[in-house]
Image (cartoon, coloured by chain):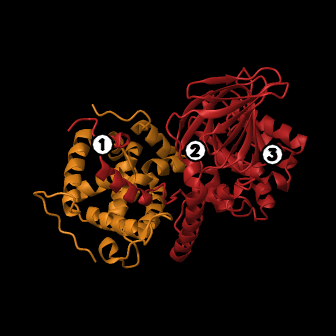
Amino acid sequence: MTDDDALWIPELDTDPELRRMQALLSPFSVRSRGLTLRPNRQISRRNRARRVAWTLVALATACALVMGVGIHRLAWQSDKPWGIVTLDTGGQSTSGALAPGSMVTTGVGETVKLAVARIGELTLSPDSQLELTTTRTGMHRVRLDVGHMRARIWAPPGYFGVQSGAAEVIDLGCDFDLWKQVNGRGRVYVRNGWIAYQVASREVLVPAGYAMQFDATNFSTPVRSNADQGFVDAMRRLDQAIADDGSDSVSAVTAADQVAARATDNDAYSLLSLLSSQPRLASSDLYPRLAKAFSLPATDAAHRRAWTEGSQDAINAWWKKLPVQPKQWLGNWTDLFG
Amino acid sequence: MRQRPHDAPSDLEIARWVRDGRSGSQVAYARLFDRFAPLVHSILLGRFRPAIADELTQECFVTAFNRLGQLNDGGKFGAWIATIARRIRPERAVNEVDSGELESHPSADSSPEASAEADRMLRIISNLPEAYREILMLRLVEGMSCPEIAALTGLTPGSVRVNLHRGMRQLRVAAGMERGETNVEWTDD
């Protein structure tokens, strides 16, 4: 027996009987049966009958999707290059391939379109630079050094991500834009679905229609792209006060009250995101303002106290009030067959 | 020193996912599921019919994510959820692989003969000792290499190799592919 026998390394494929057994049994694998995690912000026990029914529906849907197009779309040989098309200013196109570790740079008026394995597409605008860092089934990563890119992805959460300095933009099944300057500052705008922006252990979820800004070490609270400028400015002042003095500071609480005063019901997600990452601010006017946006009574002192102390249960209870949940990522693939 | 395949996450990385999962991170949940679903599903496939194994795989992760706070060493998530998978029972009574009717067609394009043969192979593997069963499922069903199995299960590559070869030997004998010294009792329904 040596290291290179077919039993040890499946790719060797030198044992016909082994190959036959694999062919017989591989349809029972996790991937073939379309098993994916049901995304849910609050993992909780539910009524068993509902859970079984939901599982059957989810499995049937997932199987239909995966068996039809999913297996082919999601599977990708490790380190296989991506297809790339460069469009110059004259409208001429050049096709090629981008291997892991390779960089693509666009000049003035030049645009590049990349096939993200088989799970989506990425457009790189003029004067931008991007590196393909990792590509294999379930894990496709690029790094945007400078410029602008747009990614449209049809895959389960976490399959695609963009590294940006110490941060990572993780696709949760969506369509988003990312801008990055040489100094590390940048912006994310989500057109459809959700993304997660992660720096170290901190994470913020950004839904469709919302944008957030970031620099090398910090990021802002997501706000609607068409939010009132007064609200946006107040939110920026609050983010800065938290970064400078902490969420317990007088300056932060004062700024939080100003945010609450400028917020409308349409800004509910911004308030929810802010209070989730800075639960101590539930002692400010933000809590009753968010309650009003959700048409909830703000008189539950126990809930407010639990939130202020960082209770995940208290926070999750209000996340459920959102009309569009992160768990609905599959429904975000509205343009999958477009 | 045990070597990991180049793309296998380290215990430190897994511990970070667990930590993020405790605060409700979807990305962390997705990464833990992607990494450990083949292990959990393989364990369950050795005990239950495929449809039940699918359902219980989701159940194991729901249970694990609900109890992340009880896991002291996040880097041991794999061994921990494997234990959950080995202990989990479906609520309704099902005597799974032996008495239940397996899926008639594991995939849309499989012939009835291939499906019957696949069922038979699954039953044989399910009757092998646990040490062989889980590794064979990971190798033959999930298509993982031995180094990948070692990294996923926490076993040494040497143990995986020995168990895999012994398990394959028993499987081949039980399936009538070769004559061997080892007899595996297997009851076809």
Q: Amino acid at mark 3?
A: Asp
Mark 2 or mark 3, which is nearer to you? 2
Disc 2 to disc 3, C-alpha distance: 39 Å
Is tag 2's residue or tag 3's residue first in the polypeptide sequence?
2
In front of the other: A13 or B103: A13
Give whichever of A50, A321 is nearer the camera: A50
Question: In this view of the protein, can residue A330 be seen by the observer?
Answer: yes
Find residue B27 and report its horizontal and vertical position in percent. 57, 46
Residue where numbered disc 2 is placed: A159
What is the letter of the orange chain?
Answer: B
Q: Percent x, y for residue B109?
A: 49, 63
Helix, strand or loop at disc 1? loop
Q: Is residue A111 above or below residue A205?
A: above
Earlier in the chain: of badge 2 and badge 1, it is: 1
- Quadrant (top left/top right/bottom left/bottom right) for the N terminus of chain A: top left
What residue did someone put label 1 on?
A: A6
Q: Amino acid at mark 2?
A: Tyr
